[in-house]
Every structure is written in structure tokens, then in C-alpha cells.
């Protein structure tokens, strides 16, 4: 028994787990956005330094970030950055992932954020609760109009 309780330590842990295991990625992303912004800015800054050091230039590259809920620790979200991609990843390859493009080593542009199917459905059913440009992007995603063939070309050739 735990002091001041009628329950064992294991019982208290199970109760705590039940109360906290309901976290969804969408609930956590809002507070994480500043951290993601810092991460993207750091990646772009580091890459610009590397390019100046080595004497080469990247016209355009992508920073792709996935956020995955750990199956063994449900309250742990893992951030997987895939920085400096010259080829554009498809928004249709998975859920809960983000894409930024960087042109001329310093101009960072948010491309998209694809949520889970459940969150996507909720957003589209309640569009007035969300940023209109984000809702429009998700509508284009659902109608398969978020990509253009030019997005997958490098120096005029399909990558």
C-alpha cells in the first residue's frame, strides 16, 4: 500500500495511465508548433551555413517532419525530421506529417500538414473552427489537388 492511500503503487499507476493515455497528436501539436518552427528554422540556418562553407547552392529543398505516437508509450510523441530533401514527399504517404519548402537557402514556406483521418473528418465537418486557408488546403488534399507535377521535378526532370 502507498502511504495515505488504500491502493497499491501498481493500482495508482494503472489509474494514472487510464487518465492520460487519451492524448491525441492533434491535441499536442498546438503547443508544439513553436518548437517545430524553431526546428525548421535551425535546419534551414544550418543548411545555409553548410552551403556557404562548401561553396554550393540549393535552389529548393524540403523539410519533412512526421509526428508518431509511440505504440509502447502512448503519451510519447516522436518527431522524425527528414531534412534537406530535394524530392518532394507525397502528402498521401501517411498521416500526421508536415512539409516546408526552402528556396534560395532562406525563404521558408509552409506547404502542408496532413492530420489523421479522424481529425481530418472533424475539421471538414467543423470548418468555422479552423483557419480558412488550412481548411481549403485539406479540401484540396481530399480532392487530390494538393500536388502539381512541377512539385516533383528537379531541374526540369521528374524526380
Image: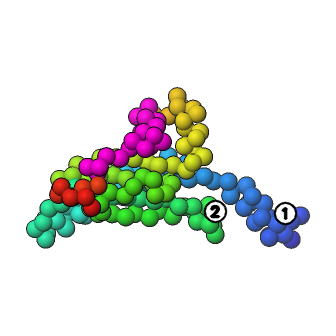
Task: Identify the mark nearer the N-term, 2 or 1.
Answer: 1
Q: What is the basis of the colouring in this image?
A: rainbow
Residue labelled with disc 2: 74
Q: Quadrant of residue 15?
A: bottom right
112 lies above or below 4 = above
Left/right of residue 63 with respect to residue 60 in the rendered view: right
Q: Magenta span covers which residues?
A: 132-151
Left/right of residue 16 with respect to residue 128 in the rendered view: right
Residue 25 or residue 87, whichever sits in front: 87
Where in the figure is residue 50, as x and y percent of width and height? 19, 67
Pointer 1: residues within 10 angstroms few (<14), some, or many (20+)? few
| Residue drawn at x 59%, y 39% as measured from the top left | 122
125 lies above or below 118 = above
As drawn, the label of residue 4 is: 1
Which quadrant, please, contains the N terminus?
A: bottom right
Where in the figure is residue 127, as x and y percent of width and height? 52, 31
Q: Secondary structure at mark 1?
A: loop
Q: Please say whether residue 44 is visible from this viewpoint.
A: no
Residue 67 or residue 15, whichever sits in front: 67
Name the mark nearer the viewer: 2 or 1.
2
Where in the figure is residue 102, as x and y percent of width and height? 25, 53
Residue furthest toward the left? 55
Mark 2 → mark 1, Cα distance in angstroms: 28 Å
Q: Please say whether residue 5 is visible from this viewpoint.
A: yes
Amino acid at each position: 500500500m502507498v502511504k495515505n492511500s488504500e491502493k497499491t503503487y501498481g493500482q495508482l499507476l494503472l489509474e494514472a495511465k487510464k487518465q492520460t493515455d487519451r492524448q491525441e497528436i492533434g491535441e499536442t501539436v498546438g503547443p508544439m508548433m513553436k518548437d517545430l518552427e524553431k526546428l525548421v528554422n535551425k535546419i534551414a540556418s544550418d543548411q545555409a551555413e553548410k552551403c556557404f562553407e562548401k561553396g554550393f547552392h540549393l535552389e529548393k529543398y524540403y523539410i519533412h517532419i512526421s509526428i508518431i505516437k509511440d505504440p509502447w508509450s502512448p503519451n510519447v510523441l516522436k518527431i522524425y525530421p527528414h531534412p534537406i530533401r530535394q524530392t518532394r514527399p507525397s502528402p498521401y504517404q501517411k498521416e500526421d506529417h508536415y512539409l516546408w519548402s526552402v528556396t534560395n537557402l532562406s525563404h521558408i514556406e509552409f506547404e502542408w500538414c496532413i492530420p489523421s483521418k479522424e481529425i481530418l473528418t472533424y475539421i471538414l465537418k467543423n470548418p468555422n473552427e479552423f483557419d480558412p486557408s488550412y481548411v481549403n488546403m485539406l479540401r484540396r488534399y481530399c480532392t487530390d489537388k494538393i500536388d502539381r507535377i512541377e512539385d516533383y521535378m528537379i531541374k526540369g526532370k521528374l524526380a
